[in-house]
Image: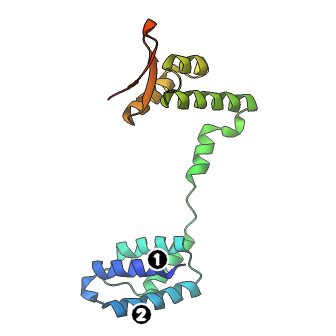
Amino acid sequence: MEIKQVQFVIAGWNLRFREANYKPEQLRFLSREYHEDLVDEQVTPEQFHAAVKIVRKRCRFFPKMVEILEAVREHRSKPPAPSNRLQIAEHTHLGDKTPEDIAKAKKRLRAISSMIAGKITLEEALEITSPEMPKSAIDNIVKGAINSGGFIKTEYGTRGAILHKIEG
């Protein structure tokens, strides 16, 4: 736990709870005391951040240390939320991929990156990614490149390959 994190929060509370009207030296003193108490209670920066959110929603006056520690205990008692990483893994079934599937996916990603960077044409990228990749997925990638102002190389019959900016 860094004292700067505590100082930042206390300065914010001084703005939010104007009736406290603490002077800078008083804020420094409170910061040191609050920091010392938080360290004594082995509060992590993440727990402090969560407690600050709880206190901000409840308190009508400048929070006392007891209110902060109650919020920390409340946060500690809640079970942790599932991480996004786990949810993604559950929905994508990455563990079910064979080494061949992973190699094909990497090849498709390299082709798409090269196309967006303007190194190969759209048609060349389609040859590399098809038939493994559905046309709708490629369309979404092209739309993403358009939205981000990316460059895509295309071919126009016998005129050869040209590089042009696709504008939305």
- Compared to residue 48, the image places residue 96 above or below, namely above
| Residue farthest to the top, as pictured | 158
**Which amino acid does the dot numbered 2 rest on?**
Phe
| Residue farthest to the right, as pictured | 99
Q: Position of residue 41 (x, y in %)?
A: 57, 85
- Residue annotated with mark 1: 5
Locate the N terminus and report the quarter of the image it occupies: bottom right
Q: Are marks 1 and 2 in contact (CB under 8 Å)?
A: no
Q: Position of residue 136 (x, y in %)?
A: 48, 23
* Quadrant in the picture for residue 143: top left
* Quadrant in the picture for residue 21: bottom left
Q: Position of residue 23 (x, y in %)?
A: 30, 91
Seen from the viewer's position, the closer of residues 150 and 80 is 150
**Which amino acid does the dot numbered 1 rest on?**
Gln
Which label's residue is closer to the chain start, 1 or 2? Answer: 1
**Res 121 label:** none
Seen from the viewer's position, the closer of residues 25 and 53 is 25
Point 46% across, 79% down: residue = 4
Point 48% across, 27% down: residue = 118
- Compared to residue 43, the image places residue 142 above or below, namely above
The secondary structure type at the circle numbered 1 is: helix
- Residue annotated with mark 2: 29
Q: Position of residue 129 (x, y in %)?
A: 59, 22
Locate the C terminus and report the quarter of the image it occupies: top left
Seen from the viewer's position, the closer of residues 16 and 1 is 1
The secondary structure type at the circle numbered 2 is: helix
**In the figure, is residue 59 to the left or right of 77?**
left
- Disc 1: CA contacts within 10 A as few (<14), some (14-19) or many (>=20): some
Gap in angstroms between the C-alphas marked 1 and 2: 14 Å
**In the figure, is residue 77 to the left or right of 16?**
right
